[in-house]
Image: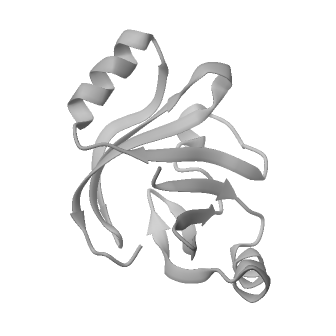
Amino acid sequence: MWNYGVKVENIEETTEFYTRYMGAEVRIQSEVLGCQYTLIRMGETRIILFDKAPYEDDMGLNLPLGFLHVVYETDDFEAEIAKLRESGVNFIMGPMVIESDFGKRKFAFFEAPDGIRTEVMQVYEDTGIA
């Protein structure tokens, strides 16, 4: 498990709440794929607070506030994608490679059973700040 993605109405206000009252640490504030985000750490858990999901426009949706997706990391992206394709999941974005403040990754978003949005990613370069 690499992180949880959460859509919030006010990134600054939500970040302030988690840092002030829940002990979170801000690691990155930036933009990726046209979305503003703040990555916070709570212990070993990363939570990315988004203004919208990176795949919202591709899906033609305005998703509600709250849980967006869960991200898991793999060392063999192509094997994972092959298994997912075999399972018949609905891919909603990717596969693609991006470079961001936390490094270079290859990823794809898909819907697991019951519509649970999930991301699989392989880290190619890690800045270590996330």
Residue in the image at 72% along x and 43% along y: 62
> With respect to residue 78, does 62 lie above or below?
below
For the C terminus, the image quarter is bottom left
Residue in the image at 44% along x and 56% along y: 33
Q: Position of residue 108 (x, y in %)?
A: 39, 37
Residue in the image at 69% along x and 56% along y: 7
Please identify the residue farthest to the bottom as the structure is shown.
20
State the residue in front, 88 or 54: 88
> With respect to residue 98, does 93 lie above or below?
above
Residue 13 quadrant = bottom right
Residue 84 quadrant = top left
State the residue in front, 31 or 125: 125
Residue in the image at 59% along x and 50% along y: 53
Q: Is residue 35 left or right of residue 121?
A: right
> With respect to residue 12, does 47 lie above or below?
above
Q: Position of residue 103 (x, y in %)?
A: 28, 66
Q: Is residue 95 left or right of residue 50?
A: left
Number of numbered discs overlaid on the protein picture: 0
Q: Is residue 2 left or right of residue 95?
A: right
Q: Position of residue 89 (x, y in %)?
A: 48, 18
State the residue in front, 7 or 43: 43
Q: Position of residue 47 (x, y in %)?
A: 59, 64
> With respect to residue 62, does 127 lie above or below?
below
Tell me how the rendering is colored. Answer: one colour
